[in-house]
Image (cartoon, grey):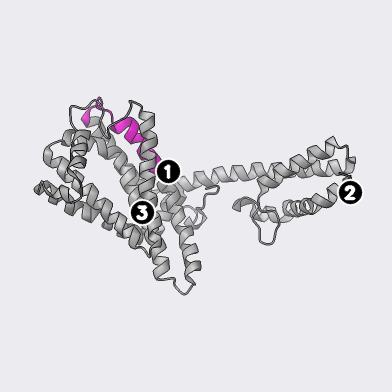
Amino acid sequence: MKQRDFEHRYGAGWDALEQWLAGAGDRGGHKGAGREAGDTVTDLPASYRALCQQLAVAKERQYTNQLIDRLNRLVMAAHHRVYRQQTLRRNTWLWYLQAGFPQAVRAQSRTVWLAAALFVLPALVMGIGSYLDDALIYSLMSPEQVTSFESMYDPGNRVLGRERGSDSDLMMFGFYIENNIGIAFRTFAAGLLFGVGAIFFLVFNGLYLGVVFGHITRVGFVATFYPFVIGHGAFELTAIVLAGAAGLRLGQALIDPGGHRRLVALRRASTEAMKIVYGTFLMLVVAAFLEAFWSSSATLPIGVKLGVGALLWLLVLAYFALAGRGSASAGEAEPHGS
Protein backbone atom coordinates (compact mmCIF):
# COMPACT_ATOMS: atom_id res chain seq x y z
CA MET A 1 0.00 0.00 0.00
CA LYS A 2 1.33 3.43 -0.94
CA GLN A 3 1.74 6.02 1.79
CA ARG A 4 -0.97 8.18 0.26
CA ASP A 5 -3.47 5.31 0.42
CA PHE A 6 -2.35 4.49 3.97
CA GLU A 7 -2.93 8.07 5.09
CA HIS A 8 -6.25 8.19 3.26
CA ARG A 9 -7.44 5.06 5.07
CA TYR A 10 -6.40 6.04 8.60
CA GLY A 11 -5.99 9.81 8.48
CA ALA A 12 -9.49 10.66 9.70
CA GLY A 13 -8.94 8.52 12.79
CA TRP A 14 -5.60 10.22 13.53
CA ASP A 15 -7.22 13.64 13.19
CA ALA A 16 -10.04 12.68 15.55
CA LEU A 17 -7.62 11.24 18.08
CA GLU A 18 -5.40 14.33 17.93
CA GLN A 19 -8.39 16.60 18.52
CA TRP A 20 -9.63 14.51 21.40
CA LEU A 21 -6.23 14.34 23.05
CA ALA A 22 -5.72 18.07 22.59
CA GLY A 23 -9.03 19.23 24.00
CA ALA A 24 -12.01 17.07 24.79
CA GLY A 25 -9.91 14.45 26.52
CA ASP A 26 -8.87 16.90 29.23
CA ARG A 27 -12.50 17.53 30.14
CA GLY A 28 -13.41 13.86 30.00
CA GLY A 29 -10.38 12.48 31.77
CA HIS A 30 -12.27 11.52 34.89
CA LYS A 31 -15.10 9.92 33.02
CA GLY A 32 -12.95 7.34 31.36
CA ALA A 33 -12.60 5.68 28.03
CA GLY A 34 -12.74 8.60 25.67
CA ARG A 35 -16.51 8.95 25.62
CA GLU A 36 -17.34 12.47 24.54
CA ALA A 37 -20.48 13.52 22.75
CA GLY A 38 -19.84 13.89 19.07
CA ASP A 39 -16.34 12.43 19.19
CA THR A 40 -15.33 9.53 17.05
CA VAL A 41 -12.93 8.32 19.74
CA THR A 42 -15.13 5.90 21.66
CA ASP A 43 -12.55 3.44 22.96
CA LEU A 44 -9.17 4.93 23.74
CA PRO A 45 -7.37 1.65 24.58
CA ALA A 46 -8.58 0.15 21.27
CA SER A 47 -7.54 3.29 19.37
CA TYR A 48 -4.14 3.15 21.09
CA ARG A 49 -3.58 -0.49 20.08
CA ALA A 50 -4.60 0.23 16.48
CA LEU A 51 -2.30 3.24 16.38
CA CYS A 52 0.66 1.13 17.56
CA GLN A 53 0.02 -1.33 14.75
CA GLN A 54 -0.19 1.48 12.19
CA LEU A 55 3.08 2.94 13.44
CA ALA A 56 4.76 -0.45 13.10
CA VAL A 57 3.44 -0.79 9.55
CA ALA A 58 4.64 2.71 8.65
CA LYS A 59 8.14 1.90 9.92
CA GLU A 60 8.23 -1.45 8.17
CA ARG A 61 7.21 0.12 4.85
CA GLN A 62 9.67 2.97 5.37
CA TYR A 63 7.14 5.75 4.92
CA THR A 64 8.35 9.32 5.31
CA ASN A 65 9.90 10.53 8.55
CA GLN A 66 7.20 13.17 8.79
CA LEU A 67 4.45 10.54 8.97
CA ILE A 68 6.38 8.33 11.37
CA ASP A 69 7.09 11.31 13.66
CA ARG A 70 3.41 12.20 13.69
CA LEU A 71 2.40 8.65 14.57
CA ASN A 72 5.11 8.50 17.24
CA ARG A 73 3.74 11.64 18.88
CA LEU A 74 0.23 10.26 18.77
CA VAL A 75 1.31 6.94 20.28
CA MET A 76 3.12 8.70 23.12
CA ALA A 77 0.17 10.99 23.83
CA ALA A 78 -2.32 8.14 23.72
CA HIS A 79 -0.11 6.00 25.96
CA HIS A 80 0.05 8.80 28.51
CA ARG A 81 -3.72 9.20 28.45
CA VAL A 82 -4.38 5.45 28.81
CA TYR A 83 -2.00 5.29 31.78
CA ARG A 84 -3.69 8.32 33.31
CA GLN A 85 -7.12 6.77 32.91
CA GLN A 86 -5.95 3.56 34.57
CA THR A 87 -4.62 5.56 37.50
CA LEU A 88 -7.87 7.51 37.77
CA ARG A 89 -9.84 4.29 37.61
CA ARG A 90 -7.84 2.79 40.48
CA ASN A 91 -8.26 5.98 42.50
CA THR A 92 -11.97 6.02 41.75
CA TRP A 93 -12.36 2.48 43.08
CA LEU A 94 -10.40 3.34 46.20
CA TRP A 95 -12.59 6.38 46.81
CA TYR A 96 -15.69 4.27 46.14
CA LEU A 97 -14.74 1.75 48.80
CA GLN A 98 -13.79 4.42 51.31
CA ALA A 99 -16.79 6.69 50.85
CA GLY A 100 -18.85 6.22 47.70
CA PHE A 101 -20.38 2.85 48.55
CA PRO A 102 -21.66 3.76 52.03
CA GLN A 103 -22.81 7.14 50.71
CA ALA A 104 -24.79 5.42 47.97
CA VAL A 105 -26.41 3.13 50.53
CA ARG A 106 -27.32 6.05 52.81
CA ALA A 107 -28.72 7.97 49.84
CA GLN A 108 -31.22 5.12 49.40
CA SER A 109 -31.81 4.63 53.12
CA ARG A 110 -35.59 4.36 52.88
CA THR A 111 -35.38 1.66 50.26
CA VAL A 112 -32.65 -0.11 52.21
CA TRP A 113 -34.78 -0.12 55.37
CA LEU A 114 -37.73 -1.44 53.39
CA ALA A 115 -35.60 -4.23 51.96
CA ALA A 116 -34.28 -5.05 55.44
CA ALA A 117 -37.83 -5.29 56.79
CA LEU A 118 -38.91 -7.55 53.91
CA PHE A 119 -35.99 -9.84 54.70
CA VAL A 120 -35.77 -9.79 58.49
CA LEU A 121 -39.43 -9.87 59.52
CA PRO A 122 -40.29 -13.08 57.63
CA ALA A 123 -37.07 -14.58 58.99
CA LEU A 124 -38.11 -13.77 62.55
CA VAL A 125 -41.63 -15.11 62.10
CA MET A 126 -40.47 -18.32 60.46
CA GLY A 127 -37.57 -18.71 62.88
CA ILE A 128 -39.79 -18.55 65.92
CA GLY A 129 -42.40 -20.71 64.25
CA SER A 130 -40.00 -23.48 63.26
CA TYR A 131 -38.43 -23.42 66.72
CA LEU A 132 -41.83 -23.99 68.29
CA ASP A 133 -43.18 -26.39 65.67
CA ASP A 134 -40.84 -29.06 64.34
CA ALA A 135 -43.11 -29.75 61.35
CA LEU A 136 -43.05 -26.20 60.02
CA ILE A 137 -39.71 -26.61 58.25
CA TYR A 138 -41.27 -29.21 55.95
CA SER A 139 -43.51 -26.53 54.48
CA LEU A 140 -40.40 -25.13 52.75
CA MET A 141 -38.03 -28.10 52.56
CA SER A 142 -38.16 -31.76 51.71
CA PRO A 143 -37.16 -34.32 54.37
CA GLU A 144 -33.93 -34.93 52.43
CA GLN A 145 -33.04 -31.22 52.56
CA VAL A 146 -33.75 -31.10 56.29
CA THR A 147 -31.50 -34.10 56.87
CA SER A 148 -28.78 -32.47 54.77
CA PHE A 149 -28.94 -29.26 56.81
CA GLU A 150 -28.78 -31.16 60.06
CA SER A 151 -25.72 -33.09 58.88
CA MET A 152 -23.99 -29.83 57.86
CA TYR A 153 -23.97 -28.59 61.43
CA ASP A 154 -23.49 -31.88 63.24
CA PRO A 155 -20.97 -31.20 66.04
CA GLY A 156 -19.15 -34.39 65.06
CA ASN A 157 -18.11 -33.02 61.66
CA ARG A 158 -14.47 -32.30 60.89
CA VAL A 159 -15.52 -29.26 58.87
CA LEU A 160 -18.78 -27.37 59.11
CA GLY A 161 -21.12 -26.20 56.39
CA ARG A 162 -21.94 -27.78 53.07
CA GLU A 163 -20.76 -31.29 52.37
CA ARG A 164 -17.60 -31.18 50.27
CA GLY A 165 -16.74 -33.27 47.30
CA SER A 166 -13.10 -32.73 48.25
CA ASP A 167 -11.18 -31.12 51.07
CA SER A 168 -10.40 -28.08 48.96
CA ASP A 169 -11.33 -24.86 50.72
CA LEU A 170 -10.44 -23.06 47.50
CA MET A 171 -13.03 -25.08 45.61
CA MET A 172 -15.65 -24.20 48.19
CA PHE A 173 -14.61 -20.56 47.92
CA GLY A 174 -15.53 -20.65 44.25
CA PHE A 175 -18.77 -22.46 45.00
CA TYR A 176 -19.79 -19.91 47.63
CA ILE A 177 -19.00 -17.00 45.29
CA GLU A 178 -21.17 -18.48 42.56
CA ASN A 179 -23.98 -19.32 44.96
CA ASN A 180 -23.99 -16.00 46.82
CA ILE A 181 -23.71 -13.81 43.76
CA GLY A 182 -26.42 -15.85 42.05
CA ILE A 183 -28.83 -15.16 44.93
CA ALA A 184 -27.96 -11.47 45.05
CA PHE A 185 -28.16 -11.01 41.28
CA ARG A 186 -31.58 -12.67 41.08
CA THR A 187 -32.83 -10.49 43.91
CA PHE A 188 -31.51 -7.36 42.20
CA ALA A 189 -32.55 -8.15 38.63
CA ALA A 190 -36.01 -9.28 39.66
CA GLY A 191 -36.67 -5.68 40.65
CA LEU A 192 -37.29 -5.03 36.97
CA LEU A 193 -40.65 -6.77 37.45
CA PHE A 194 -41.95 -3.51 38.95
CA GLY A 195 -40.27 -4.41 42.23
CA VAL A 196 -42.41 -7.51 42.77
CA GLY A 197 -39.59 -9.89 41.95
CA ALA A 198 -37.24 -8.25 44.43
CA ILE A 199 -39.92 -8.39 47.12
CA PHE A 200 -40.49 -12.07 46.39
CA PHE A 201 -36.83 -13.02 46.69
CA LEU A 202 -36.30 -10.94 49.82
CA VAL A 203 -39.29 -12.51 51.56
CA PHE A 204 -38.47 -16.01 50.31
CA ASN A 205 -34.85 -15.80 51.40
CA GLY A 206 -35.98 -14.40 54.75
CA LEU A 207 -38.39 -17.30 55.25
CA TYR A 208 -35.74 -19.82 54.20
CA LEU A 209 -33.15 -18.33 56.51
CA GLY A 210 -35.59 -18.15 59.40
CA VAL A 211 -36.75 -21.73 59.11
CA VAL A 212 -33.16 -22.97 59.12
CA PHE A 213 -32.25 -20.87 62.15
CA GLY A 214 -35.31 -22.01 64.05
CA HIS A 215 -34.95 -25.68 63.23
CA ILE A 216 -31.22 -25.96 63.84
CA THR A 217 -31.68 -24.18 67.15
CA ARG A 218 -34.48 -26.56 68.03
CA VAL A 219 -32.38 -29.67 67.37
CA GLY A 220 -29.61 -28.26 69.56
CA PHE A 221 -26.75 -27.65 67.11
CA VAL A 222 -26.27 -24.08 68.34
CA ALA A 223 -22.62 -24.64 69.30
CA THR A 224 -21.73 -25.30 65.66
CA PHE A 225 -24.38 -23.37 63.74
CA TYR A 226 -24.08 -19.88 65.21
CA PRO A 227 -20.27 -19.78 65.24
CA PHE A 228 -20.43 -20.90 61.60
CA VAL A 229 -22.83 -18.26 60.32
CA ILE A 230 -22.01 -15.21 62.39
CA GLY A 231 -18.74 -14.29 60.65
CA HIS A 232 -19.60 -14.42 56.96
CA GLY A 233 -23.24 -13.57 57.71
CA ALA A 234 -22.26 -9.98 58.43
CA PHE A 235 -21.31 -9.58 54.78
CA GLU A 236 -23.60 -12.10 53.10
CA LEU A 237 -26.90 -11.17 54.74
CA THR A 238 -26.21 -7.45 54.49
CA ALA A 239 -25.33 -7.85 50.83
CA ILE A 240 -28.57 -9.69 50.08
CA VAL A 241 -30.55 -6.88 51.68
CA LEU A 242 -28.62 -4.29 49.67
CA ALA A 243 -29.13 -6.23 46.44
CA GLY A 244 -32.84 -6.27 47.21
CA ALA A 245 -32.80 -2.53 47.89
CA ALA A 246 -31.13 -1.93 44.52
CA GLY A 247 -33.79 -4.07 42.85
CA LEU A 248 -36.56 -2.17 44.63
CA ARG A 249 -35.04 1.08 43.35
CA LEU A 250 -35.47 -0.22 39.79
CA GLY A 251 -39.04 -1.21 40.49
CA GLN A 252 -39.79 2.19 42.02
CA ALA A 253 -38.59 3.93 38.86
CA LEU A 254 -40.95 1.85 36.74
CA ILE A 255 -43.96 2.36 39.02
CA ASP A 256 -43.35 6.05 39.67
CA PRO A 257 -41.11 7.52 36.94
CA GLY A 258 -41.51 11.02 38.42
CA GLY A 259 -42.45 12.89 35.26
CA HIS A 260 -39.87 11.13 33.07
CA ARG A 261 -40.44 8.48 30.49
CA ARG A 262 -40.13 5.08 32.13
CA LEU A 263 -37.02 4.21 30.14
CA VAL A 264 -35.33 7.45 31.23
CA ALA A 265 -36.39 6.95 34.84
CA LEU A 266 -35.12 3.38 34.76
CA ARG A 267 -31.77 4.48 33.37
CA ARG A 268 -31.39 7.08 36.13
CA ALA A 269 -32.41 4.56 38.78
CA SER A 270 -30.00 1.99 37.34
CA THR A 271 -27.13 4.41 37.81
CA GLU A 272 -28.03 4.83 41.48
CA ALA A 273 -28.66 1.13 41.96
CA MET A 274 -25.36 0.06 40.41
CA LYS A 275 -23.46 2.20 42.91
CA ILE A 276 -24.85 -0.20 45.52
CA VAL A 277 -24.56 -3.37 43.44
CA TYR A 278 -20.81 -2.99 42.81
CA GLY A 279 -20.14 -2.97 46.53
CA THR A 280 -22.66 -5.70 47.17
CA PHE A 281 -20.79 -8.10 44.93
CA LEU A 282 -17.52 -7.25 46.67
CA MET A 283 -19.14 -8.01 50.01
CA LEU A 284 -20.28 -11.38 48.70
CA VAL A 285 -16.74 -12.24 47.67
CA VAL A 286 -15.57 -11.41 51.20
CA ALA A 287 -18.42 -13.51 52.61
CA ALA A 288 -17.46 -16.46 50.40
CA PHE A 289 -13.84 -16.19 51.52
CA LEU A 290 -14.80 -16.20 55.20
CA GLU A 291 -17.26 -19.04 54.74
CA ALA A 292 -14.71 -21.23 52.96
CA PHE A 293 -11.63 -20.52 55.04
CA TRP A 294 -12.88 -19.36 58.45
CA SER A 295 -16.47 -20.34 59.21
CA SER A 296 -16.05 -23.97 58.15
CA SER A 297 -13.18 -24.63 60.52
CA ALA A 298 -14.08 -26.97 63.37
CA THR A 299 -10.77 -26.43 65.15
CA LEU A 300 -11.16 -22.76 66.07
CA PRO A 301 -12.59 -22.10 69.54
CA ILE A 302 -16.27 -21.18 69.53
CA GLY A 303 -15.62 -18.08 71.61
CA VAL A 304 -13.13 -16.79 69.05
CA LYS A 305 -15.52 -17.31 66.14
CA LEU A 306 -18.37 -15.65 68.01
CA GLY A 307 -16.19 -12.74 69.07
CA VAL A 308 -14.78 -12.17 65.60
CA GLY A 309 -18.24 -12.52 64.08
CA ALA A 310 -19.69 -9.93 66.45
CA LEU A 311 -16.81 -7.59 65.64
CA LEU A 312 -17.40 -8.02 61.90
CA TRP A 313 -21.08 -7.12 62.33
CA LEU A 314 -20.11 -3.98 64.22
CA LEU A 315 -17.58 -3.03 61.55
CA VAL A 316 -20.06 -3.53 58.72
CA LEU A 317 -22.76 -1.49 60.44
CA ALA A 318 -20.29 1.24 61.39
CA TYR A 319 -18.97 1.33 57.83
CA PHE A 320 -22.39 2.08 56.38
CA ALA A 321 -23.31 4.48 59.15
CA LEU A 322 -20.10 6.51 59.29
CA ALA A 323 -17.80 6.02 56.31
CA GLY A 324 -17.71 8.83 53.78
CA ARG A 325 -19.51 11.40 55.89
CA GLY A 326 -18.17 14.83 55.00
CA SER A 327 -16.62 13.54 51.77
CA ALA A 328 -17.66 14.44 48.23
CA SER A 329 -21.16 13.67 47.00
CA ALA A 330 -22.28 10.10 46.46
CA GLY A 331 -23.07 11.09 42.92
CA GLU A 332 -19.39 10.75 42.08
CA ALA A 333 -19.32 7.11 43.10
CA GLU A 334 -19.34 5.49 39.69
CA PRO A 335 -16.54 2.96 39.35
CA HIS A 336 -15.44 2.31 35.80
CA GLY A 337 -14.59 -0.84 34.02
CA SER A 338 -17.43 -2.90 35.40
- Residue tagged 1: 282
Residue 89 location, quadrant: top right
Image-based side of 60 in relation to 207, left or right:
right
- Would residue 333 appear left or right of 150 to someone viewing this image? right
Q: What residue is at 66 percent from the left and 58 percent from the top?
A: 36
Question: Please, what secondary structure does the residue beneath circle 1 have?
Answer: helix
Mark 3 and mark 2: Cα distance apart in space = 57 Å
- Give the amino acid type for the residue marked by disc 3 in the picture: Thr
Residue 112 in picture, x, y percent from top left: 34, 57
User: Measured from the top left, where is residue 298 in percent x and y?
Assistant: 24, 27
* Mark 2 residue crowding within 10 angstroms, few (<14) / some (14–19) / many (20+): few
Q: Is residue 306 left or right of residue 238?
A: left
Name the element at disc 3.
Answer: helix
- The crowd level at tag 3 (other Cα within 10 Å; few <14, some 14-19, many 20+) is many
Question: Under tag 2, what secondary structure?
Answer: helix
Residue 256 x, y percent position in the rendering: 40, 71
Residue drawn where x is 30% and y is 55% of the image: 202
Q: Earlier in the sequence, mark 3 or mark 2?
A: 2
Q: From this viewpoint, which residue is outermost toward the bottom?
A: 259
Q: Tell me the kind of residue under disc 2.
A: Arg
Q: Is residue 207 magenta?
A: no
Q: Is residue 18 positioned above or below 147 on the image?
A: below
Would you say the residues marked 3 and 2 are in contact, meaning their CB atoms lie under 8 Å apart? no
Which residue matches tag 3?
Answer: 187
Q: Earlier in the sequence, mark 1 or mark 3?
A: 3
Q: Which residue is mark 2?
A: 4
